[in-house]
Image: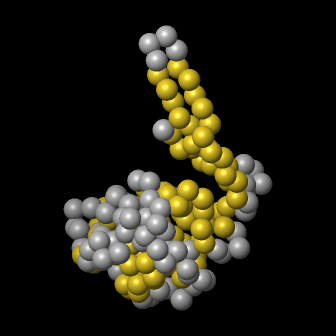
């Protein structure tokens, strides 16, 4: 099964699920489901979880929700997008078993993790920017210039062997 997202020039998301059947003498492709949602500004996904950031600032999520990472107050997997229970969002990243959300106040919240936070859990303040680096980690840029890694256990740490290009120079994280 393959899941493909397409965002057209008008900001409309179309999501296709393709089932591919391979036989000895032929290959069959079947479109299983199609969903459309408009005015998508950003898509972030990892594993089976997909998060949609709409132009109006609302966040919609679908897919795997074993840990509560969809942010809809449940741990029920969703085939179609549901609105996340969070407001005033400026950035969002999917990190596998958790989703991180940054709001206009610089507050960083997560949904999911092994603790199954189905409601927003505040993990940091004075955050400027967030970037996913892997399934279980992300980079958090703080407003004071500090840059830290954060993992699925919600532990912040410095990882000095990891360098990123920030602005016009390399920064060790």
Residue closer to the observer: 55 or 127: 55
Q: Is residue 15 left or right of residue 44?
A: right
The residue lying furthest to the top in this view is 25
How far across and how far down the image is residue 12, in percent?
Answer: 72, 55
Residue closer to the observer: 10 or 167: 10
The residue lying furthest to the front in this view is 76
Residue closer to the observer: 173 or 30: 30
The residue at the point 49 percent across, 85 percent down is: 106
The residue lying furthest to the right in this view is 10
Give the quadrant of the C terminus. bottom left
How far across and how far down the image is residue 9, in percent?
Answer: 75, 50
The vertical placement of 96 against 57, above or below, is: above
The residue at the point 66 percent across, 67 percent down is: 54
The residue at the point 59 percent across, 83 percent down is: 87
Residue 108 visible in image: no
The residue at the point 27 percent across, 61 percent down is: 162
Q: Is residue 48 left or right of residue 115?
A: right
How far across and how far down the image is residue 109, in percent?
Answer: 44, 81
Using the rendered view, name the quadrant where residue 155 is placed: bottom left
The vertical placement of 81 against 115, above or below, is: above
The vertical placement of 32 against 44, above or below, is: above
User: Which colour scheme appears in the figure?
Assistant: secondary structure
Residue 32 visible in image: yes
**How many discs mark residues in the rendered view?**
0
């Amino acid at each position: 099964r393959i899941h493909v997202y397409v965002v057209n020039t008008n900001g409309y998301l179309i999501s296709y699920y393709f089932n591919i059947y391979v036989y000895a003498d032929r290959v069959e492709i079947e479109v299983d489901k199609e969903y459309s949602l408009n005015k998508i500004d950003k898509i972030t996904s990892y594993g089976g979880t997909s998060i949609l950031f709409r132009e109006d600032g609302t966040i919609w999520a679908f897919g795997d929700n074993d840990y509560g990472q969809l942010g809809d107050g449940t741990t029920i997997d969703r085939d179609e997008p549901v609105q996340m229970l969070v407001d005033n969002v400026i950035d969002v990243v999917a990190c596998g078993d958790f989703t991180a959300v940054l709001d206009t106040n610089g507050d960083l919240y997560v949904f999911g993790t092994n603790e199954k936070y189905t409601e927003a859990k505040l993990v940091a303040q004075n955050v400027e920017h967030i970037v996913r680096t892997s399934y279980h980690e992300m980079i958090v840029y703080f407003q004071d210039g500090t840059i830290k890694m954060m993992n699925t256990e919600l532990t912040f740490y410095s990882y000095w062997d990891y360098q990123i290009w920030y602005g016009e120079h390399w920064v060790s994280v």
